[in-house]
Image (cartoon, rainbow, N blue to C red):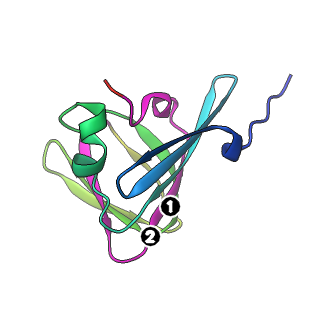
Amino acid sequence: MAGIVNLAAGEVRTFEHGTAEIATTGTITVSRLTFRPGWRWSNDVRPVAGTGSCMVHHKGVTISGRLHVVMDDGSEFEIGAGDVGEIPPGHDAWVVGDEPWVGVDFSDDMATYATPA
């Protein structure tokens, strides 16, 4: 049987400069992430996660805004509105500009995002 869960009815995790709305149905976890200007993973989520970099393997689409990503190996890239992308574990990221970054993530790893490691 199919399952339906509204993101608004899922779990909401808040942290400095952002929120993660997370819903799971069956084996699928979907998240809507909203990061306001000033958000940076290493400043806003690392204190909660307790890891040196973000260890979630993100797979999703950007709805609005821009996000700059720096991988642990030093490589960098940006994602923006309409981009579908994948960010492997081991990265830092931050919002670029004055517009909030909003994305939808289809990574099962999001079930543990912004929780103690």
Q: Are marks 2 and 1 in contact (CB under 8 Å)?
A: yes
Name the residue beneath numbered marker 2: 65
Q: Quadrant of residue 114?
A: top left
Give the camera-side residue of 60 and 40.
Answer: 40
Q: Residues within 10 Å of mark 1 (few under 14, many from 20)?
A: many
Label 2, secondary structure: give it: loop
From the top left corner, tell me how far across and down residue 26 is, in percent: 70, 23
Tell me which residue sits at (50%, 29%) in the image: 111
x, y percentage for residue 50?
Answer: 23, 30
- Does residue 25 lie above or below 35 as drawn? above
- Region rendered in magenta: 89-115
For disc 1, the marked residue is: 102
The extreme bottom residue here reads 98
Outermost residue, left side: 74
- Residue at x 63%, y 29% (from the top left corner): 28
Q: Tell me the quarter of the image containing the C terminus.
A: top left
Mark toward the start of the polypeptide (2 vs 1): 2
